[in-house]
Image (tube, rainbow, N blue to C red):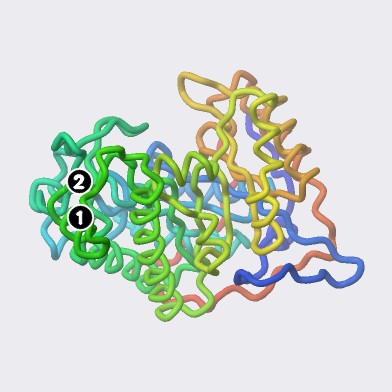
C-alpha cells in the first residue's frame, strides 16, 4: 500500500536546526520560542541500494521530510573505501574505482542537494574512522601505519567483523584522515561532518614501536603492561583529543560555520574502553552537536543513561540527542519501544537519532504503513514559530540537478 504524503514540503523546510553553538554557557531562548528538536537518521552502507538509485533516493527524502526529520547522516567512509568520487583515496592508490550511483551520479552530491532543497541537513558520516578491514588495500599498503596489542596482535572484533586500527598517533594517519575529511567538506560544500565511536582506539592497542617510543620520549617510562592503567589511558585519549581539535579547526577554516557532529558510545565505555574523551570534546568546543549511542533493548537499562551528568552538561552547551536502535535485520525494534524512548528523551530536553534508515519502516515487527503512521504521529508536533536559520551557502555540484520530487514508494 502506498504511504500517503504526510506533510507538505513547506512544513518540512521548517525543520532545519540553528547554526552550531560553540561550547559556551547555555543561551537563554527568546520568549515564546522552543528550541528545535534534533531528529536524525543514519544512511548506512546497507541503505545504498536506495541511495544509489536516483528515483528511490528522491522518494525516500520526500518521505523523511514529510516525517519531519531535520538531520541525515550519510556514510562516506566505510571499509577503507570512499563512497564518493575521491581523488585522495584514488591518488593514494588504496581505491582503484570511483563510487557512483546506478545512473552514474555522484551519490553524496545529489543527496546533499536533494536534502537541502527539502530543508534536510545532510552531514557526511565518516563511519570507519581509524578502523579498516584487514584485507583492505589501505591496510595492505601501509602495514607500518597499524597499531598493535601488547602481544603483537593487529586486529580486534567489531560490529563490522574483524578489523585493524590505523595508529591515530602517527602523523601519516592524521594527514590521511584530514585530507579525506577536508575533501568531503570542500568538494560538496557540506554543512558539516560527523564522526562516531570509531574515531577512537580500543584500549588494548598502542603497543606498536612508534607509540611506545613516543610515550617513552614524553614520559620517560615504558607503557604499562596493564592496558587500563589510568595514566596510560589518559595519555592516549589526550592525543586523540588533540588531533580532533586540529581536525575541527581545519574543517572550520575550510568551511566556516560547518558543524562538527559526534556520535560516541556512553561516556564510561567511550573513555575507558575506547580512549574517546568526548566530554572534553564538548567542553573544549571541538563538537557542535552530540548524539550518544545508547542501543539498549529495554527502558530499564535505557533511562538511567539519560540522567548522566555529562549528558545534562552537554545539553546546556550544544544540541544533544540520544541515538536509538530502530531495528536490525535479526533484531526488530517494536514501534511502541521507539515511542517510549523518544518520549523519555523529550522529557529531558534531548533529541533523537535512529540507526538506521531501512529499519525505520522496513525491518520492524509491524507493517511498514503502521510504522510510518506511528512516526508521523510521533513527530507531528513541531511549533509553527520555529523557522530555520539560513543554511550555509551551497557549492556547485559536478552532477546534473536532481529530478523533480516524486511520490513515496509503496
Along the line of sight, which residue is nearer the eye, 372 or 126?
A: 126
Which image quarter: residue 151?
A: top left
Relative to 42, residue 85 above or below = below
Q: Secondary structure at mark 2?
A: loop
Q: Is residue 410 visible?
A: no
Where's residue 97, x and y in %? 17, 53
Relative to 4, residue 166 above or below = below
| Residue at the (49%, 26%) spot, across then down | 328
Q: Mark number for residue 388? A: none
Q: Is residue 91 left or right of residue 106?
A: left
Residue under label 1: 211
Where's residue 336, x and y in %? 72, 25
Q: Secondary structure at mark 1?
A: helix
| Residue at the (63%, 62%) spot, across then down | 119
Along the line of sight, which residue is nearer the eye, 183 or 347?
A: 347
Where's residue 191, x and y in %? 51, 68
Along the line of sight, which residue is nearer the eye, 383 or 199?
A: 199
Q: Is residue 286 left or right of residue 324?
A: left
Where's residue 91, x and y in %? 14, 65
The C terminus sits in image quarter: top right
Relative to 265, residue 220 above or below = below
Q: Alpha-carbon neighbours of circle 1 within 10 Å: few (<14), some, or many (≥20)?
A: many
Residue under label 2: 207
Which image quarter: residue 135?
A: top left
Q: Find out whether the residues at labels 2 and 1 contact each other: C-beta distance under 8 Å.
A: yes
Amino acid at each position: 500500500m502506498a504511504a500517503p504524503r504526510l506533510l507538505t514540503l513547506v512544513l518540512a523546510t521548517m525543520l532545519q536546526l540553528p547554526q552550531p553553538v560553540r561550547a559556551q554557557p547555555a543561551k537563554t531562548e527568546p520568549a515564546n520560542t522552543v528550541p528545535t528538536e534534533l531528529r536524525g537518521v543514519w544512511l548506512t552502507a546497507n541503505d545504498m541500494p536506495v541511495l544509489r538509485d536516483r528515483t528511490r533516493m528522491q522518494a525516500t527524502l520526500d518521505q523523511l521530510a514529510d516525517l519531519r526529520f531535520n538531520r541525515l547522516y550519510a556514510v562516506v567512509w566505510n571499509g577503507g573505501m570512499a563512497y564518493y568520487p575521491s581523488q585522495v583515496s584514488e591518488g593514494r592508490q588504496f581505491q582503484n574505482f570511483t563510487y557512483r550511483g546506478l545512473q552514474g551520479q555522484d551519490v553524496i552530491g545529489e543527496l546533499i542537494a536533494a536534502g537541502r532543497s527539502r530543508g534536510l541537513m545532510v552531514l557526511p558520516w565518516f563511519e570507519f574512522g581509524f578502523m579498516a578491514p584487514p584485507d583492505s588495500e589501505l591496510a595492505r599498503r601501509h602495514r607500518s601505519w597499524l597499531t598493535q596489542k601488547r602481544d603483537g596482535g593487529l586486529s580486534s572484533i567489531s560490529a563490522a567483523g574483524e578489523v585493524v586500527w590505523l595508529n591515530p598517533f602517527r602523523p601519516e594517519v592524521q594527514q590521511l584522515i584530514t585530507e579525506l575529511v577536508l575533501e568531503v567538506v570542500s568538494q560538496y560544500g557540506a554543512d558539516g561532518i560527523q564522526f562516531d565511536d570509531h574515531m577512537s582506539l580500543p584500549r588494548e592497542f598502542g603497543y606498536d614501536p612508534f607509540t611506545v617510543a613516543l610515550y617513552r620520549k614524553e614520559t620517560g617510562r615504558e607503557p604499562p603492561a596493564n592496558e587500563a592503567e589510568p595514566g596510560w589511558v589518559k595519555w592516549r585519549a589526550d592525543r586523540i583529543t588533540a588531533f580532533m581539535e586540529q581536525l575541527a579547526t581545519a574543517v572550520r577554516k575550510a568551511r566556516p560555520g560547518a558543524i562538527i557532529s559526534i556520535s560516541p558510545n556512553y561516556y564510561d565505555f567511550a573513555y575507558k574502553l575506547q580512549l574517546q574523551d568526548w566530554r572534553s570534546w564538548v567542553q573544549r568546543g571541538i563538537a557542535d552537536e552530540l548524539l550518544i549511542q545508547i542501543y539498549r533493548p529495554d527502558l530499564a537499562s535505557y533511562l538511567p543513561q539519560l540522567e548522566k551528568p555529562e549528558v545534562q552538561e552537554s545539553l546546556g552547551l550544544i544540541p544533544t540527542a540520544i541515538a536509538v536502535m530502530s531495528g536490525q535485520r535479526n533484531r526488530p525494534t517494536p514501534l511502541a519501544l521507539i515511542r517510549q524512548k523518544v518520549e523519555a528523551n523529550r522529557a529531558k530536553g534531548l533529541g533523537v537519532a535512529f540507526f538506521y534508515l531501512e529499519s525505520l519502516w522496513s525491518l520492524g515487527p509491524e507493517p511498514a504503513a503502521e510504522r510510518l503512521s506511528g512516526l508521523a504521529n510521533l513527530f507531528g508536533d513541531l511549533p509553527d514559530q520555529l523557522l530555520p536559520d539560513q543554511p550555509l551557502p551551497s557549492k556547485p555540484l559536478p552532477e546534473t540537478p536532481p529530478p523533480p520530487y516524486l511520490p513515496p514508494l509503496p
